[in-house]
Image (cartoon, rainbow, N blue to C red):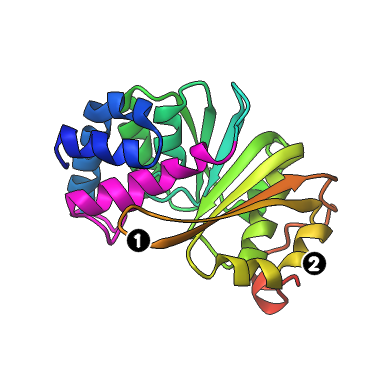
């Protein structure tokens, strides 16, 4: 992990100086990620500086742009190595986080990591399209987050069915995020959402990012989400 001084400077750069106080836990996260990644493919970014900026800072930046309600329930869809949900939970311990992933080995990593970091969290082993049709999870979360999971029209179909009416879907996207959003405008409306904001920004190293904020305004029709095969064959537009 980068030095505490460098980490503090990074958190100040992204306007989250309070997160610098969690340096020891972020350093542990980095170490565990690097060690587990030798055994299983969690991330292509493993160098200390890359993890700090392109994973931690990238995951935390949305907290500077969107006011998340205190005590909100958050489902992190396609959690992988825990981004963005785990850094958010470390910076905002009031959030009630559920990690959703289709691969049990990723959730095993997250379960052991969250225990070491003392971050209360729930692990949900399921495909997003199945969870979205399950009454136990459908429209039960205040917030859904996703980073680098799928093209936006597919991502919206994965995530919006999980969000309560009135809740938020936060999509962390790269430079092409706005192009994906334009192609998915009809899909968002069909799924009960409305684009509330689009934030264009860059990581401290210069990489372009787009945060797309969708407000859930109406219940998602019962036919959505469809199976992954149908999504691939006939993407929503």
- Closer to viewer: mark 1 or mark 2: 1
Which quadrant holds the C terminus?
A: bottom right
- Asked if residue 72 lies left or right of residue 30, the reply is right
Give x and y (percent) for residue 226. 73, 62
On screen, residue 102 above or below 113: below
Question: Is 46 in front, or is 81?
Answer: 46
Q: Which range of residues does the magenta coloring cover?
A: 38-66
| Mark 2 neighbour class, 10 Å CA radius: few under 14, some 14 to 19, many 20 or more | some
Mark 1: few, some, or many residues within 10 Å (few <14, many ≥20)?
few
Tag 1 secondary structure: loop
Mark 2 element type: helix
Residue bearing mark 1: 206
Relative image position of residue 18 (x, y in whole percent): 37, 25
According to the picture, the residue beneath numbered tag 2 turns out to be 186
* Quadrant of res 166: top right
Q: Is residue 198 left or right of residue 1?
A: right
């Amino acid at each position: 992990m980068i030095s505490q001084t460098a980490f503090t400077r990074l958190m100040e750069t992204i306007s989250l100086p309070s997160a610098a106080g969690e340096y020891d836990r972020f350093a542990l996260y980095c170490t565990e990620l690097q060690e587990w990644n030798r055994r299983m493919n969690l991330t292509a970014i493993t160098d200390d500086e890359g993890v700090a900026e392109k994973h931690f800072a990238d995951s935390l930046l949305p907290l500077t742009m969107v006011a998340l309600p205190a005590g909100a329930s958050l489902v992190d869809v396609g959690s992988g190595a825990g981004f963005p949900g785990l850094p958010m939970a470390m910076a905002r311990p009031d959030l009630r986080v559920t990690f959703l992933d289709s691969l049990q080995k990723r959730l095993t990593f997250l379960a052991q990591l969250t225990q070491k970091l003392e971050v209360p969290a729930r692990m949900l082993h399921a495909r997003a399209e199945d969870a979205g049709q399950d009454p136990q999870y459908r429209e039960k979360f205040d917030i859904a987050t996703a980073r680098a999971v799928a093209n936006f029209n597919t991502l919206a179909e994965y995530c919006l069915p999980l969000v309560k009416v009135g809740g938020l879907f936060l999509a962390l996207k790269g430079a092409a995020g706005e192009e994906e959003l334009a192609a998915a405008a009809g899909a968002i409306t069909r799924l009960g959402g409305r684009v509330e904001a689009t934030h264009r920004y860059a990581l401290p190293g210069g990489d372009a990012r787009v945060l797309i904020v969708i407000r859930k305004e109406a219940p998602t029709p019962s036919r959505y989400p469809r199976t992954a095969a149908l999504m691939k064959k006939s993407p929503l537009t």
